Image (cartoon, rainbow, N blue to C red):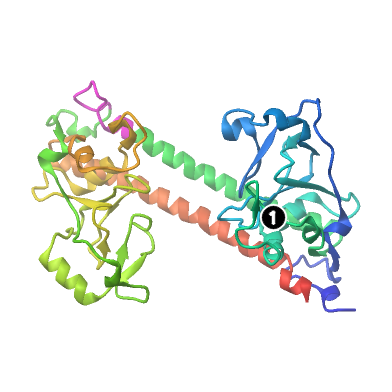
Amino acid sequence: MSKAKELIPKTRFPEYTYKWDETSLGEISTIVKEKAGKQKYLLMSVTSGVGLVPQTEKFGKEIAGDSYKNYTVIQKYDFAYNKSSTKQFPEGYISMLHDYEAAAVPNSIFTCFRIADHKGYPLFFEYLFRSNYHGRWLRKYIEVGARAHGALSVNTKHLWSMPIALPCFEEQKKIAECLSSSDALISAESKKLEALIKYKKGLIQKLFPTKDKKLPEWRFPEFKNGASWKRKLFSDILEIMMCKRIFADETNTTGGVPFYKIGTLGGKPDCFISQSVFEEYKTKYNYPRKGEILISCSGTVGRCIQYDGSDAYFQDSNIVWADNPTLEINNNLLFHLLSNVNWNKLNSTTITRIYTFDLKKLILVFPEDPCEQQKIAACLSEIDSFITAQSDKVENLKAHRKGLMQQLFPSLEETEA
């Protein structure tokens, strides 16, 4: 018996002790070739990492046109390999139809197949493909940049020759049910996260006045009969600042002071600058004070972070900050106000960049009493801490599920051995 035929995953259920068999996708599946013709079917597209979705949901309409008659008809539990490259799935994405009894997909970019009833539990294979198992196999056969009519140039013989380690039907089902339970937990916790975000949005609407009101609908009891609220232009109380420009030859990829560009503000730095350059520029030129609000002016427009005072440098013009020397408005409250601005409402078209004049004309509404400002900010920050904790929980569950998939399936390298 070859090494490949003695495959055993790293983690498995105790009632199963036999070796997994080696087969190939072509040996356990059949190609689906039925065409839509004049028969009406639900038309599907694919969202990478999500799966098959109705065209009306993704594009707002059906886009088949004259090519509809050539669409491939798939049945529930059939698989469709989309040969379009995405960042998450560079070699294409394989999706299973499980929410509908039948549908049709474009034959130009989809190769469709069906797992033989006696060979496989469909959901087992959906999880296998979701781990990009097929991508790790196909990448050696796809030329970089090779495309035909927008799709990757893939010879399907390589798809059918893909080696697969296969347990018995009962163990396949057990593995799929385990991963489905993990997905259900992730879905439930994600809904909690969505509920918290929605709650915060509703709370903000209650804690701040609407356009035609001078006071908010809700106030904390101790401020109910307190001072009035202010409406002020950004430019009347704040100044827009930015760091001195850093050029490419002043950066490195190995270490030093983190340098953030628009794509990494609030995350991992793009690169680094030397400590000596940082100290010089920080001393000679504009630099944010701890607590001031940094704003992304392009890319993800309007992303805000509150500077924590640590050594870091920020890309000029694309990242600015609100200089707030008088503290007429509390920086903690300002963070929440700027984080919840609908930047697109500043212009008649979708905004792709925040310019100085956009910020200057922004109207800020806030309580006059510094204590009330701090109270509102503390309340919203508390909600943010719950949102962050819940978000971390969801990400940890996803990481656990990913690790579980790696343990429950033998690797492609083991299967090829």
Give the residue type at disc 1: Ser
Disc 1 on helix, strand or loop? loop
Please give the residue where the numbered disc 1 appears in the rendered image.
Answer: 153
Taking the magenta stretch, the answer to whether it contains residue 157 is: no
In the image, 61 versus 256, the foreground residue is 61
Residue 407 in the image: above or below residue 232: below
Farthest residue toward the left?
326
In the image, 372 versus 52, the foreground residue is 52
Residue 106 in the image: above or below residue 128: above
Q: Quadrant of the N terminus?
A: bottom right
The residue under the point 78% across, 71% down is: 415
The residue under the point 91% across, 52% down is: 118
Where is residue 244 shown, x and y percent of the image? 18, 61
Crowding around mark 1 (Cα neighbors within 10 Å: few <14, some 14 to 19, many 20+) is some
Where is residue 311 shown, x and y percent of the image? 24, 68
Left or right: 142 as drawn, with respect to 16 = left
In the image, 9 versus 357, the foreground residue is 357
Where is residue 90 shown, x and y percent of the image? 61, 57
Where is residue 351 shown, x and y percent of the image? 34, 37
Segment tinted magenta in the rendering = 204-217
Residue 173 in the image: above or below residue 6: above
Left or right: 286 as drawn, with respect to 401 = left
Left or right: 352 as drawn, with respect to 146 = left
